[in-house]
Amino acid sequence: MRSILVLAGLAAFLALAPATVRAQELTLTIKDHKFTPSEIKVPANKRVILTVVNDDATPEEFDSKALKVEKVVAGKSKGIVRIGPLKPGRYPFVGEYHESTAKGAVIAE
Amino acid sequence: MLGALIIVFREVIEAGLIIGIVMAATRGVFGRGRWVSIGVIAGVLGAGVVAGFAGAISDAFQGSGQELFNASVLSIAVVMLMWHNAWMARHGREIAAEMRQVGAAVSEGAKPLTALAVVVGLAVLREGSEVVLFLYGIAASGTSGSALLVGGLLGIAAGAAFTALTYFGLLAIPTRYIFSVTSWLIALLAAGMAAQAVQFLNNGGVMVVLDRTMWDTSWMLSEGSIFGRLLHTLIGYTERPTELQLVVYVGTLVAMYVLMRIARHQPRERFAAAE
């Protein structure tokens, strides 16, 4: 019960926080269990929206511990992945269901 | 085949750990086997449904449906775990005493088994839907599918064996300590889930606050490794926690502690009536 109060408090804080700057949007495509582009550059210290387009018929899970994202993208559909703000560096990600081929990295700079 | 086995196994052990702990935490409580089974079966059915509607869930709420769904599932589980611990704080000692006297599972009165059945069901639902999607992908891709499918099924079997190992491992704890140990395990489990839930809210763009990374321990223990995943489920290990995750983690532990203290001192009638 107390956690709900904590969440409510944080939600109120969120409402009072200044509006965040509009995030940058980029696209990643999955085809034949591979990511294109396999490396994607994003600005550091900003929130970025990645649209993951899955052109394969089978589902894939965009998974990155480094980016703190786990997102299932159904076959022939797309999913929105919100990342950042990231410190400059390389953040690897994989398609968890086809880890041998589906891999790539976000490069924040 | 080995690849499929590993992928499925590491999804299954997360739910398996939770089931093992729940089983140990309800030791000596009458009817718990039935409730846990109901939780598992409902979870498996739910996993199929969630997997089937993965696309629709993902598209809901401007593409944040999946994140909101996961955050909700985790939040419900946290509340249920709190309820269980509060109840155990009140009645655990009596049950332990009974078990010592009779040496068997004998306990009367209403038990918060529904709460734990829900926790088990939700854990199976969350991890299970990923297994279903993965196996569906294998089945749909045809060639060499059968070997992978066998790998997947072996992964489930290995996960079940792991659950049994967790359970019997916890049973080795002397009766008089078992409820304090499982209460702590459940408190840490709940704190980890709460921290995970707020990260889903952040990913969904709903709660974008205190999102700076506090530290990075990926060099020491990768969250993707089997041991990292176990610790992630068990105590909420996160290689790069955000400020908000840390606040919510500590907040949940404190809330749990306060709740258990209150429950311990509450007159029995009031608490029994609440059920």
Image (cartoon, grey):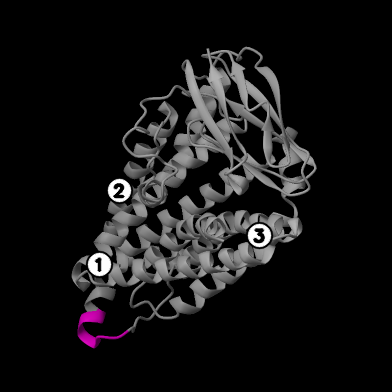
The residue identified by callout 1 is B178
- In three-dimensional space, the C-alpha distance between marks 2 and 3, rounded to whole angstroms, equals 41 Å
Above or below, B201 against B125 in this view is: above
Which chain letter goes with mark 1? B
Task: Report if residue A94 is visible in the image.
Answer: yes
- Asked if the magenta segment contains residue B81, the reply would be no
Residue at x 59%, y 71% (from the top left corner): B41
Amino acid type at circle 2 is Tyr
Residues B99 and A23: in front is A23
Residues A52 and B267: in front is A52
Residue at x 53%, y 68% (from the top left corner): B154
Q: Residues within 10 Å of mark 3 (few under 14, many from 20)?
A: many
- Image x and y of residue A21, in percent: 62, 12
Which chain letter goes with mark 3? B
Q: Nearer the viewer, mark 2 or mark 3?
A: 3
The residue identified by callout 3 is B135
The residue identified by callout 2 is B257
Q: Residue furthest front?
A: B144
Q: Residues within 10 Å of mark 1 (few under 14, many from 20)?
A: many
Main SS, magenta region, reads: helix
Above or below, B30 against A90 in this view is: below
Residue at x 28%, y 52% (from the top left corner): B261
Residue A26's image quarter?
top right
